[in-house]
Amino acid sequence: MSGRATVATSGDVAEPSAEVLAEAAATFGLLASPARLQIVWVLAQGERDVTALAESVGGALPAVSQHLTKLKLAGLVRSRREGRRVVYLISDENVVTLVRWLVGRLTGQEGATERVHGLGA
């Protein structure tokens, strides 16, 4: 018997490690905040600076800044400088796909999944 740990499988997919599950739970935890979810939704439409983002989500600038910091630390968004402005954008398109799928499903938008995958208009 080797010293390697065995990985249980479910069908053709290996069971994720405890570390992967913890990371997934942390990501879902970040997205469990309606404010952060809305920020991700808005940034999925295009990059914005913090002022424009606060206007789009109807939040106070300091609160939006704090949410962006958390999302940035988690690697879900990133920023870049444009002169004096700091512009925020999505860094993980898979998260956008997940958010669009879930929101589309919950709002009954039948074509949401096709649009996410580039199959629809």
Image (spheres, rainbow, N blue to C red):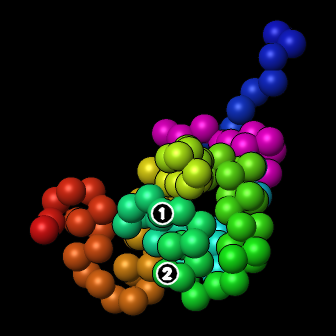
| Residue 86 versus residue 52 in the image, above or below | above
At horizontal 77% and vertical 67% (from top left) the residue drawn is: 66
Residue, far right: 3
At horizontal 75% and vertical 77% (from top left) the residue drawn is: 63
Q: Can residue 29 be seen in this view?
A: no
Query: Horizontally, is 118 left or right of 36 in the view?
Result: left
Q: Position of residue 18 (x, y in %)?
A: 81, 44
Q: Where is residue 37 in the image (x, y as percent from the top left)?
A: 59, 74
Quick one: 64 or 70, which is closer to the camera?
64
Quick one: 6 or 81, which is closer to the camera?
81
Question: In the rendered structure, which disc, 2 or 1, sits on the residue that comes first in sequence?
Answer: 1
Q: Quadrant of the N terminus?
A: top right
* Residue designated by label 1: 48
Q: Where is residue 31 in the image (x, y as percent from the top left)?
A: 65, 69
Q: Is mark 1 on a helix, strand or loop?
A: strand
Query: Horizontally, is 102 left or right of 69 in the view?
Result: left
Question: Marks 2/1: CA distance?
Answer: 9 Å
* Residue designated by label 2: 56
Q: Can residue 79 be seen in this view?
A: yes
Which range is magenta? 12-22
